[in-house]
Amino acid sequence: MVRSLFPAKLFFVINVDWFFLSHRLNVAKAAHKSGYSVHLVCNITDPNWISSYPWITVHHVPFDRSGRNIFFSIYSLFRLYYILVRHSPDIIHAVTLQPIMFVGLISKIKHLSPIVYAFAGLGFLRKESDSFLLLYAKQLLLSFLSSDAPNCFILQNKSDYHYITSRVSAPASSFYILPGSGIDLSQYATHVPVTAPYTILMASRILRSKGILEYIASSKLVHLTHPSVSFLLAGKLDPDNPDSITRDELLQLCKGYVQYIGFISNITQLLQTCSVFVLPSYYSEGLPRVLCEAQASGRPVVTTNHPGCADAIIPNVTGLLVPVKDHNSLACSLRQLLDNPDLLLQMGRKARQHAFLTFSAQNIAASHLSIYKSLLC
């Protein structure tokens, strides 16, 4: 319990409401239970969920995730400034790059309370070939974050941790690695073992950099030797993202090999129906939640040797790693599992054990509360 005359005000600043609900709600619930007054600053895309959580005070800021509208971004920055100055949070928990950048800038203009900068992936910070404008934006953001103030930084994988610690000037004790946002393991109490006929599943936002094209290309190769195997693709179209694939283009690409089933709200149930989970991503991942969920379901994973993805599994124990943008290697790894039912079952059991030991939402929420407490001291 936070012990003070008034509850400590914890402000989550995040780009969009659905990301908060899927990736930070468990932390918010734990904070509320511990006595914090929880606020959420985000772009509200669907207000219907708000009535389900009356203990969250929601503030609308129309963050532009595409970055295409400079006037929207400026308005969002001033709107965020007004909210933070007016309410004087005790802790600010900024998640995703645009909120992190805006909060960092505001903190240079106006002294703010302790800030938790939580990176769900480093986005344009990790791009190797940048324009002068992006290089300048990188340097600006890193300068916003560098501080002697009692702030902290949460990264989700070792690669991102080393990148930020080598470029942001702050005490070493300010940096943490936490394995994503965690998952509610009670949803995976029932384990349905893998049986034939086999189904391969990929679930992600419909972005090119998630490896959608590589998944479809590999399905065509595997189909040649394993015509009875089914391939499913689940996920939300994301037209606000410049990396998105349109529905018409996707359906044309999938035709005859992969069944696109759209966005599925109950991913737990869907995972129980598949045999192998695939995520051939080269997106700037933090630690993909869906890989944690797939392993909790007892499903072996085939993913890329890419920051975040590689951190989520134990290679050759809970799944297999393949090079990025290599559909041939992806097809070979899928065939390896399909041709070895014992290996498939063994990896599934190990995956489930790994998930239950590593990705508990309860434990990860407790780690966040410990960080908050250290900042308030």
Image (cartoon, grey):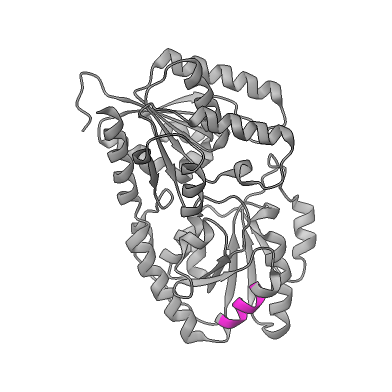
In the rendered structure, the answer to whether residue 83 lies left or right of residue 249 reads left
Residue 254 placed where, x, y %? 74, 64
Position of the C terminus by quadrant: top left
Write down the region rendered in magenta. 330-336
Q: Is residue 334 magenta?
A: yes
Q: Is residue 320 magenta?
A: no
The answer to whether residue 300 is seen in the rendering is no
Residue 350 placed where, x, y %? 39, 73
**Residue found at x 59% / y 71%:** 200
Residue 319 placed where, x, y %? 50, 72
Examine the rendered structure and indicate whether residue 206 appears above or below residue 373.
below
- Which of the 4 quarters of the picture holds residue 56? top left
**Residue found at x 31% / y 34%:** 372
In the rendered structure, the answer to whether residue 76 lies left or right of residue 316 reads right
In the rendered structure, the answer to whether residue 68 lies left or right of residue 98 reads right
Residue 120 placed where, x, y %? 51, 45
Seen from the viewer's position, the closer of residues 101 and 172 is: 172
Examine the rendered structure and indicate whether residue 275 appears above or below residue 324.
below
Seen from the viewer's position, the closer of residues 232 and 15 is: 15
